[in-house]
Amino acid sequence: MDSTVVNSLKNSLEDFKSTLDWLNHSYELCKKTGIKDDYSVEELDAFENLTSRYARTTDFRVNCHFWDIKTSIKPITTGVF
């Protein structure tokens, strides 16, 4: 792998770590709230943030990080065709 690909993967991983930090922040807020019958508007906002951040984190992981890995792998040509 050339240095451009390695740097791209490193940057992608750093961005992913930042995304995980925000997801963890939302999770900790919601964990304090727990499960109950009635929620305040602020608590509902916190749960909405958690689900949104979870969706963004999984989207980032699949679409960005794995895309960087896929594009960094050069196809092997064996001359079969």
Image (tube, rainbow, N blue to C red):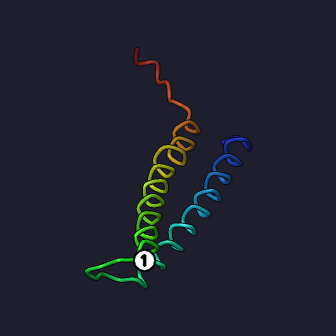
Which quadrant of the structure image shows residue 21?
A: bottom right
Q: Position of residue 66 (x, y in %)?
A: 50, 46
Q: Position of residue 58 (x, y in %)?
A: 44, 54
Q: How many marks?
A: 1
Q: Residue at x 35, y 83 (%)?
A: 34
Q: Is residue 69 left or right of residue 15?
A: left
Which quadrant of the structure image shows residue 55?
A: bottom left
Foreground: 30 or 3? 30
81 over 17 or under it: above or below: above
Foreground: 6 or 64? 64
The residue wearing badge 1 is: 30
Indicate the secondary structure of the residue bearing disc 1.
Answer: helix
Q: Residue at x 46, y 73 (%)?
A: 42
Q: Work out which quarter of the rendered image holds the N terminus and state it.
A: top right
Alpha-carbon neighbours of circle 1 within 10 Å: few (<14), some, or many (≥20)? some
Name, please, the residue furthest toward the right.
Answer: 3
Check disc 1 and give the amino acid type. Cys
Q: Position of residue 26 (x, y in %)?
A: 49, 71
Q: Is residue 36 left or right of residue 7?
A: left
Q: Residue at x 43, y 85 (%)?
A: 32
23 over 40 or under it: above or below: above
